[in-house]
Amino acid sequence: MAKYLVIVESPAKVKTIKKFLGANYEVLASNGHVRDMPKSQLGFDAENNYEPKYITIRGKGDILAKLRKEVKKADKIYLATDPDREGEAISWHLYIALKLEEKKVYRITFNEITKNAVKESLKNPREIDMSLVDAQQARRMLDRMVGYRISPLLWAKIKRGLSAGRVQSVALRIICDREDEINAFIPEEYWTLDAALKIKGEKKPLMAKYHGMGDKKAEIHSKADMDKILKELEQAEFAVAEIKKGERVKKAPLPFITSTLQQEASKALNFSTQKTMRLAQQLYEGVELKGQGTVGIITYLRTDSTRVSDEAVAASKEYITNNYGAEYAADVTAEKKKEQKIQDAHEAIRPTDISNTPANLKESLSRDQFRLYQLIWKRFTASRMTPAKYETTSVKIDAKGHRFTVSASKLDFDGFMSVYKETDDEKAESNTLLKEITKDTKLTLESFDSRQHFTQPPSHYTEASLVRALEELGIGRPSTYAPTITTIMARRYVVKEDKNLYVSELGEVVNSMMKDAFPTIVDVNFTANLEALLDKVEDGAVSWKTVVANFYPDLDEAVKKAEKELDEVEIADEVSDELCDVCGRNMVIKYGPHGKFLACPGFPECRSTKPYFEKIGVTCPKCGKEVVIRKTKKGRKYYGCEAIPDCDFMVWQKPSKEKCERCGGIMLVKGSKLVCADEQCGYVKKIEESQKAAQ
């Protein structure tokens, strides 16, 4: 009897797939990659056409031995690793490591681990796609070039244990650039004016927003502007000038891709990108369902495609028609058009069987698995449904030439919203439809509500918004978003507080060095173009060695230049005024994993250390002691009184020695300007060149 061997990546898939196949099939796992370039060296020969050197990964010898034993027994071998570049490369490495040249070897892929998908893949085997393998090899080598050549420079200049990366260094720069924007942001004052208008017979007043003069929109920038408008509106009669009724259609969302799943899971479930991918992997590889055994309940989780298979489209239409009604089932759903090809051979992330509702599977899943599956199921189901429809009413109200407006909407048909609402939609306030109002409706002014506001700086990145930024800029790929964010947090370049990502002092130092010594590596456009080139390698349009050969010489030159300049700089410990409590010597400033600290120069005889607080030459406005640079427990920098916790003064931006000329309060340095810390004061002063050095 014929014997077939199926090799997958993950042991978790073995049990699921074995159940679908007969006794003739043996299913084993490679536990990921079995070969890689050696850790102790760069791993390729630049003098020999960049030929990579591969060795068996330590610890994989027993696995390969077991696989070789089964290979000898097998008539056919099916390589069933993941359906992406990485999976293709693992299949190729298995082919080489197991010496399968003389065997009947087939490559099979499936986007979902279900009986039909697995059996269908066995009917449609193919050869290993070397273009995919080459794209992965090129990516791996480019990443190694950056990491292995630049990281030692970071060790020499800053401290050991740091790392640079082709994608992580750009991600760090994006966060640092946003931090610079926030720090340089100067709030601008603006005002809003609402009019509460009484309609006869109605208990609640109609709230109208100020628009401007006639159809021309006007901004209110100051209290003086507001007072002028209110003066002109004294004794004014309010009258309905125009009423427009219409319909607004809200389209169904697209099904999830990797980046949108990570973003929505972060916003709706407060999951980190790493946690989302770990749970999604479990749902994809298979969970034990009551009455069904071990089944993969979602499709492949690393994808940039919104495509949905014909079978899934037909099944979803039938399910929605039977459970919600024919009017809820959409005929087609638009797919997101992408300019570049990115793992588009996949489908969107969806349930493998729409009839496996979250309620039906709840008892079989952990709490977090259930929450993520429910999110995926609802999003996919909604994507196959008809749009929601709103009845809208827009009213223009005039008073002495001034225009106020009222907009309202009423949900007319819920469509996909009967199943799913995005987090942002749920947070948005719903407008109540106006009661019947005509041009003859009498309006009486009850009161004005004038409010002062200040423009807000850009938001700090969250994991969700950083993933969106990386995707929009074309940096990284679905498989890299989570590990990139995890790495920059693990290296303490970035800290996370209340979902927001903040640059640590260490991150600022590393980013500054990378921008100075390797501006191309941290250039957003350069990195995006490199990703596009890797896509062309995948398509077979560009040779992978051409990409590598064009990249390495410039990097090599930049590293050698930086090494030379670094050798000229003596990085000596800075001596402080603080005396060691143990031996009385002047303590020196050292760098540790969490930034600067004070240490006794007598180490190892004297091991005394103290926290280091850098003085900025500004006195505390509350108690008169020194303001120093401090850090939160997670490493975010701020400016606070040296007497904390006895004094509670702290600000996020650097305080200036100058006092506010208007209110006498503290001024903050924001880019090229000084801004009063009191927003109500709002005083701004440009920093003169002579002052910049002093700040």
Image (cartoon, rainbow, N blue to C red):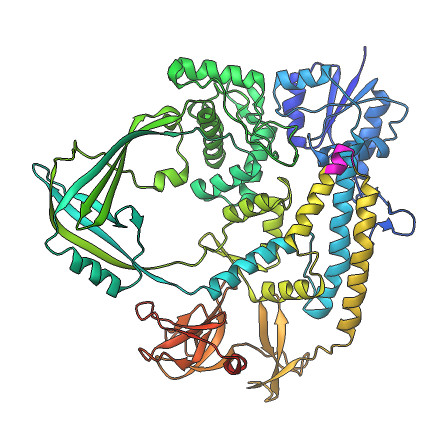
Give left or right: position of 429 versus 443. Answer: right
Q: Quadrant of the N terminus?
A: top right
Q: Nearer the viewer, residue 59 or 251?
A: 251
Where does the magenta region start and end?
536-541
Q: Position of residue 208 (x, y in %)?
A: 21, 45
- Based on the displayed image, in which of its 4 quarters is residue 410 positioned? top left
Give left or right: position of 217 versus 505. Answer: left
Q: Of helix, strand and loop, which mostly describes the magenta segment?
A: helix
Q: Nearer the viewer, residue 658 or 498?
A: 658
* Residue farthest to the top, as pictured: 1
Can residue 38 be seen here? no
Placement of 114 over or under 192, stated as above or below: above
Q: Position of residue 73 (x, y in %)?
A: 84, 20
Residue at figure coordinates x 37%, y 63% from the top left: 188
Q: Position of residue 451 (x, y in %)?
A: 25, 58
Counting the numbered discs, the total is: 0
Would residue 321 be counted in the magenta stretch? no
* Residue farthest to the bottom, as pictured: 584
- Based on the displayed image, in which of its 4 quarters is residue 54 positioned? top right
Can residue 191 be seen here? yes
Give left or right: position of 188 versus 534. Answer: left
Q: Nearer the viewer, residue 2 or 183?
A: 183
Q: Nearer the viewer, residue 508 or 21?
A: 508
Give left or right: position of 459 versus 164. Answer: left
Q: Position of residue 432 (x, y in %)?
A: 24, 36
